[in-house]
Image (cartoon, helix red, strand yellow):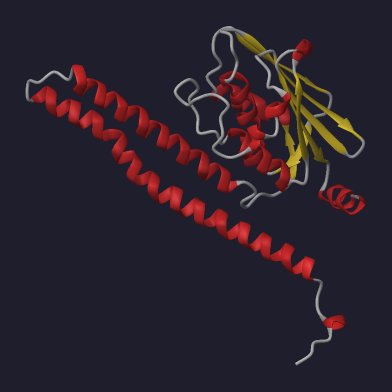
Amino acid sequence: MSYNLDTCCDTSDVFHLDMQASTSELDDFVYLISHDVRNSVRALIELPQWIKEDLSQAGIKAEGSVAESIELMNNHTGRLDRMLVDLLTFSRVGRLADEEPIGVDDALGDILEQLRIPVGFSVRTELSCDTLPMGARDILTLLTQLLSNAIKHHDKSSGEILVTLANLSNHAILRVQDDGPGIPSQYRERIFAAMTTLKPRDEVEGSGMGLAIVRKIVQFYQGQIVVCSGLNGQGTTIEVSMPRTKKSAALNSLQN
């Protein structure tokens, strides 16, 4: 049997489409599993408290190894719940997203009202342009993860975070800069991997999904992300370059 290769479709296009379909199916799977498992985890989170209350009603004070075991259960179930929440967030990137100009100043205002900014930390903004073309939920997730990351990994009890947004050609450049400990250059690619932290989770609470979520959002909107030094040569700057429109993103991909 022989085949006329001239009539075959471009296998690279087929592979690209197959990869897109596989990624979408994987995201759907992660979403469903994380959602269902979290229902069980919520019950596990309440279990240590139920045990403590039952002991109290029986006239037994939870102390010593019993108290330590209950606290350990609280810590691990809380960590598992945070991981599932972040997996749900990761799987939702781009889901039902209508790309439109979103006001960054308003989005930051909403986020800062919800985030618990520690006393001693300040967040400044310098926005020379007003909007980013993204889905509303994705831009809230992007900014929340970047700000949370800057605060959580700071090495001091006080610090400064600067958020800037500017136009450059047909791209919007978003920067989140801090004056924390910084990230050595050899680790700057690793920080975007899922479930990765540079410090043990006993030292810094988190699932290690924050910057993986950020990278997925940026890739979904065909942008680019880089890490460099932060304020006054210290700390970290995470710079996101986002195409102003889908048309400019498509043109940029063709040119590359």
Nearest to the observer: residue 73 or residue 117:
73
Residue 230 shown left or right of residue 252 in the figure: left
Q: Residue at x 68, y 18 (%)?
A: 182
Compared with residue 123, is residue 199 higher up or lower down, i.e. above or below?
below
| Residue appearing at x 52%, y 19% in the figure | 116
Determine which quarter of the picture holds residue 104: top right
Relative horizontal placement of residue 141, taking residue 128 as reference (left or right): left
In this rendered view, identify the residue nearer to me: 47 or 228.
Answer: 228
Tell me: residue 27, above or below residue 243: below
**Where is residue 115 drawn, in percent x and y?**
55, 23
Q: Residue furthest bottom?
A: 1
Q: Position of residue 44 (x, y in %)?
A: 29, 38
* Quadrant location, the N terminus: bottom right
**Which residue is depicted at the point 81% across and 50% down?**
246
Residue 67 versus residue 242 in the image, above or below: above
* Image coordinates for residue 48, horizontal then vertical, percent: 25, 30
Spot occupied by residue 3 in the image (x, y as percentages of width and height): 80, 87
The part of the image, by quadrant, that contains residue 239 is top right
Going 56% across and 20% down the picture, which residue do you hit?
Answer: 152
Q: Is residue 123 left or right of residue 175?
A: left
